[in-house]
Image (cartoon, rainbow, N blue to C red):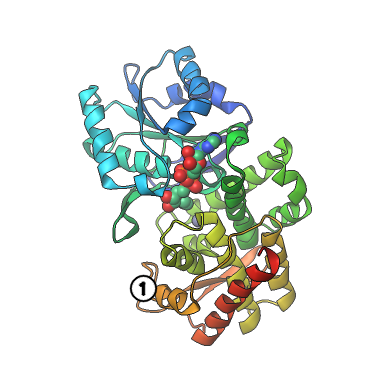
Amino acid sequence: MKRIKIKLKTQSYDVLIGTGLLRQAGREVRRVLPSKSSRVFVVTSPRVRRHWGGVLEKSLLDAGLQYVVLEMNDGEPAKHLATVERLAEQMVAAGADRKSLVLAFGGGVVGDSAGFLAAMFLRGIPVVQIPTTLLAQVDASIGGKTGVNLKGGKNLIGAFHQPQVVLVDPSVLSTLDDREFRAGLFESLKCGVIRDQALFDFMTRKAPQILKRDKAALLRIITDSVRAKAEVVSADEKESDLRRILNFGHTIGHALETVTGYQYFLHGEAVAWGMIAAADIAGAVGVCKPEIAEQIKTAVLAFGPLPRVNCATDAVLSRLTSDKKTVAGAVHFVLPQKIGKVKITSDIPTEIVRNAVDRIRNEQIRNHA
Ligand SMILES: NC(=O)c1ccc[n+]([C@@H]2O[C@H](COP(=O)([O-])OP(=O)(O)OC[C@H]3O[C@@H](n4cnc5c(N)ncnc54)[C@H](O)[C@@H]3O)[C@@H](O)[C@H]2O)c1
Ligand SMILES: [Zn+2]
C-alpha cells in the first residue's frame, strides 16, 4: 500500500492507495473515527452501490462499525443543493450527531456533494473519501474542495473541507465505462505535463497497457498523479498561485463544457481538448517549442477518441471572458514551457486563442470523424 501525505497548515492527512484496499476500508475508517460510538453515514449512488457496496459494507461490518447507507444519483445534474439538503434531513432523521462521520463513496459528484454535506452538517463533521472513478481518484477527492452547482454555473457554492483520509483502490475501476475511464486519464496526463515528466513519458510509452487497465500501470499512474496533486495542494492550500497550475487545459476546457451545456463532453474530454489548445497557444507565442506542443497533442490523442468540438469558435471565446476564474477581466492560461514545467500567462492575443480553438475544431474532423 502506498501512502501519500497531504500536509496542510491546519490539518494533514493521508491518501492511501492499494489494489484491494476497499476490503480494508472499515479498518482505515475506524482509525479516524471521532469516537468509538460514532456512526458512519455512507453516501453513495445506486450504481456504485450495486457494483461495490457489498465489499465496502462487509469491511465496515468486519471492523465493527455502525453505519447507514444514503443514496444520491450521480452525474452532474444531481450535484445541487437540494440533494445535500435531502441527505442532511435523512441524517437528522437517522440520529446523526457531531460525532458522526460521512463516508463519500462514489465518483466526483458524490465526493463533492457528500464532502459539502459534511462541511455544512452541524457546521462541520469529519468526512472520508473513497473515490470510485479515475477522475475522482486522481483529482476530485484530493485537496478538500467540496461543493455543488447552481443553475447559474458549476461549483458556485462550496467550502474547503479536508477529508480525514482518502482511500484509493484502483480495482474498483474495472467496472467503469470506457469513456469515463479515458476521461480520467486526461487528468493524469495533465499532472505529467505540469510537473512530472517521467509520468508523461510513462503514459506515452504505455498507452496500450493503460487503456487495457493493466493493474501495475494503473497503480503507477494513479500514485504519481496523486503525488503531483498532493505536492501542489500541500504547498498551496487555498487556491492561489501554485494551485492554478492544476488548471492546465481547463481554461478552454471549461469554456467548451459551458458552451455545450455540460451534456456533451465529459469533464476530462473537454480538458483534453483544452490541453491541446493550450499547448498550441504556447507553441504559437514561443513559450514552448512547436515540437513540445505536438508531443502533448499526440499524447492526448493516444487516449482518445474524443467527441468532436462542434461549437462555434466565437461562443467559446466569449465564454472565456466570463469564466469565474477570470481575474479582473484577463483570461489566464497555463502554458507548457516543456514537459513537466508550466507557466501562467494572461496576455495572450485573442487572435492566437481564436486560431487554437479553430484548430481543435478542425482536428476532430481529421482524427475521429
Ligand atoms: N473537488 C475537486 O477538486 C474536483 C476536481 C475535479 C472534478 N470535480 C468534480 O467531479 C465531478 C465529476 O466526477 P466524475 O467524473 O467522477 O463523475 P460522476 O461522479 O458523475 O461519475 C461518473 C459515472 O461513473 C459511475 N461510476 C462511479 N464509480 C463507478 C465504478 N467504480 N464503476 C462503475 N461506474 C462507476 C457513476 O455512476 C457515474 O455514472 C464534477 O462534478 C467535477 O466538478 C471536483
Ligand atoms: Zn479537471
Judge whether residue 337 can be spotted in this image: no
Q: Is residue 257 left or right of residue 101?
A: right
Callout 1: CB less than 8 Å from ligand 1: no
Residue 366, how many percent across, how many down? 69, 70
Return the residue at label 1: 322
Location of residue 43 with respect to 351 vertically, above or below: above
Judge whether residue 362 can be spotted in this image: yes
**Quarter the N terminus occupies:** top right
- How many C-alpha atoms fall within 10 Å of the one at disc 1: few (<14), some, or many (≥20)? some
Location of residue 333 with respect to 36 vertically, above or below: below
Total marks placed: 1
Residue 11, how many percent across, how many down? 40, 41
Q: Is residue 83 left or right of residue 270?
A: left
Residue 78, how many percent across, how many down? 35, 44
Location of residue 323 with respect to 110 vertically, above or below: below
Location of residue 217 with respect to 264 vertically, above or below: above
SS at badge 1: loop
**Quarter the C terminus occupies:** bottom right
Which of 232 and 142 lies nearest the eye of the viewer? Answer: 142
Which of 239 and 269 lies nearest the eye of the viewer? Answer: 269
Residue type at numbered disc 1: Ser
Residue 320, how many percent across, how many down? 43, 74
Q: Is residue 251 left or right of residue 42?
A: right
The residue lying furthest to the right in this view is 205
Which of 353 and 51 lies nearest the eye of the viewer? Answer: 51
Q: Residue at x 27, y 46 (%)?
A: 81
The residue lying furthest to the front in this view is 369
Q: Residue at x 30, y 39 (%)?
A: 117
- Quadrant of the rendered structure where residue 326 is? bottom left
